[in-house]
């Protein structure tokens, strides 16, 4: 699996050895991370990746991707899939080190994941965020997702990649 490049980011599909290093918070010899990476969200996502890989084998292209800033070649977070696609859809998750937030990197990484989904013929991508995480809600909206429902704790979003809709997502993918 090849890295996915955006104008400012590299999304690297990790393997088990890389996941183990992230989980142990031990940057490898080739690893260069911002000081506040990985954070608890990364540890949880990589742990899930390791468990899913052990139980079901290779996860890529629907696994975890390390987000690296091209300007300084430092890892700033992660983005990935919360399992393999089912019925033409998949759920995603993402997170950035606090020091990397507020620059539009999350939306840029999410759009890159959507291109993978399109390449594999998926038509629906879902994500959720806590009700108080306004920045995450904005990232999803900027990436072409729409709010579908809310409850006391979460806001649920969907990107329609099908032919009959998803114009905001298609615009995000083409920019």
Image (cartoon, rainbow, N blue to C red):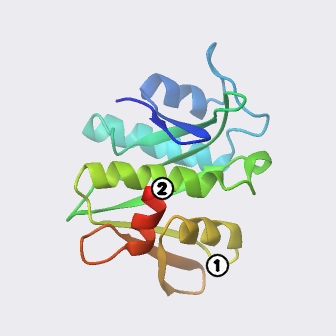
- Of tags 2 and 1, the one toward the viewer is 2
Instruction: Please state the horizontal and vertical placement of residue 169, each as a whole percent of the image.
Output: 43, 67
Task: Say above or below: 29 vs 121.
Answer: above
Above or below, 41 against 47 in this view is: below
**Residue 119 in view:** yes
Q: Pointer 2: residues within 10 angstroms few (<14), some, or many (20+)?
A: many
Describe the element under mark 2 as helix, strand or loop.
helix
Give percent across and percent down for residue 77. Answer: 63, 43
Residue 133 visible to an observer of this rendering: no
* Residue at figure coordinates x 43%, y 58% from the top left: 173
For residue 70, which quarter of the picture? top right
Residue drawn at x 77%, y 40% is 36
Q: Quadrant of the N terminus?
A: top left
42 with respect to 132 (left or right): left
Q: Residues within 10 Å of mark 1 (few under 14, many from 20)?
A: some
Q: CA distance from mark 2 to mark 1?
A: 22 Å
In this rendering, the answer to whether 55 lies above or below 104 is: above
Is residue 14 left or right of 70 when viewed as pictured? left
Residue 131: mark: 1
Q: Quadrant of residue 78?
A: top right
Q: Which residue is mark 2?
A: 111
Residue 92 percent coordinates (x, y) = 44, 58
N-terminal label among 2 and 1: 2
Q: Quadrant of residue 27?
A: top right
């Amino acid at each position: 699996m090849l890295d996915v490049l955006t104008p400012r980011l590299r999304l690297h599909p990790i393997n088990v050895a890389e996941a183990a290093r992230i989980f142990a918070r031990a940057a490898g010899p080739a690893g260069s991370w911002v000081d506040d990476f990985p954070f608890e969200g990364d540890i949880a996502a990589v742990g899930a990746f390791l468990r899913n890989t052990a139980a079901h084998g290779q996860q890529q292209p629907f696994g975890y991707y390390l987000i690296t800033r091209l300007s300084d070649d430092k890892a700033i977070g992660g983005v990935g899939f919360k399992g393999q696609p089912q019925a033409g859809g998949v759920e995603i998750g993402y997170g950035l080190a606090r020091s990397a937030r507020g620059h539009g990197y999350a939306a840029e990484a999410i759009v890159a994941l959507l291109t993978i989904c399109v390449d594999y013929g998926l038509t629906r991508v879902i994500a959720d965020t806590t009700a108080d995480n306004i920045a995450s809600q904005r990232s999803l909206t900027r990436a072409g997702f729409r709010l579908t429902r809310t409850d006391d704790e979460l806001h649920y979003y969907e990107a329609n990649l099908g032919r009959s809709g998803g114009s905001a997502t298609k615009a995000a993918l083409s920019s």
